[in-house]
Image: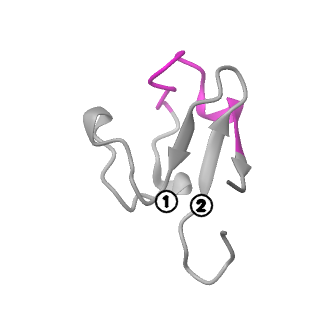
């Protein structure tokens, strides 16, 4: 799935299970496709439940 060879990663909200996919971004939230997790603003919140970025964990799907 995701390695350190430049591929995109996915991060899951530990509160509701929403998955942030770096490849897809969240255009409706102003996060363009291809935006790396570290480049997502610290004040961004889960679009499903409002959890903070720190409530997400990298996952392999």
Q: Describe residue 10's horizontal placement relative to residue 23 as left or right.
A: right
Q: Measuring from the top left, give residue 23's x and y in whole percent.
A: 43, 60
Mark 1 secondary-structure assignment: loop
> In the image as oriented, which residue stretches furthest toward the bottom?
5
Overall secondary structure of the magenta section: loop
Label 2, secondary structure: give it.
Answer: loop
Q: How many marks?
A: 2
Height in image: 61 above or below 5? above
Disc 1: CA contacts within 10 A as few (<14), some (14-19) or many (>=20): some
Crowding near pointer 2: few (<14 within 10 Å), some, many (20+)?
Answer: many
Furthest residue toward top: 49
Examine the rendered structure and indicate whether residue 26 appears above or below residue 37: above
Q: What stretch of residues is rendered in magenta?
A: 43-57
Judging depth in this view, the residue of 1 and 9 nearest the camera is 1
Proximity of marks 1 and 2: CB atoms separated by less than 8 Å? yes
- Which residue is denoted by mark 1 in the rendering? 36
Q: Residue at x 53, y 37 (%)?
A: 42
Q: Nearer the viewer, mark 1 or mark 2?
A: 2
Q: CA distance from mark 1 to mark 2?
A: 8 Å
List x then y, in percent, for residue 44. 46, 32
Marker disc for residue 26: none
Q: How is the image coloured?
A: one colour
In the image, taking residue 61 as reference, residue 20 lies left or right, namely left
Residue at (28, 42) in percent of width and height: 27
The residue at 65%/28% (across/down) is 17
Q: Is residue 54 magenta?
A: yes
The N terminus sits in image quarter: bottom right
Residue 10 at x, y = what percent? 60, 53
Q: Nearer the viewer, residue 32 or 10?
A: 10
- Magenta span includes 48: yes
Quadrant of the rendering where the C terminus is positioned: bottom right
The residue carrying mark 2 is 9
């Amino acid at each position: 799935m995701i390695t350190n060879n430049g591929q995109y990663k996915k991060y899951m909200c530990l509160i509701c299970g929403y998955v942030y996919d770096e490849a897809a971004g969240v255009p409706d939230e102003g996060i363009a496709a291809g935006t790396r997790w570290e480049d997502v603003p610290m004040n961004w919140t889960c679009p499903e439940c409002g959890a903070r970025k720190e409530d997400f964990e990298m996952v392999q799907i």
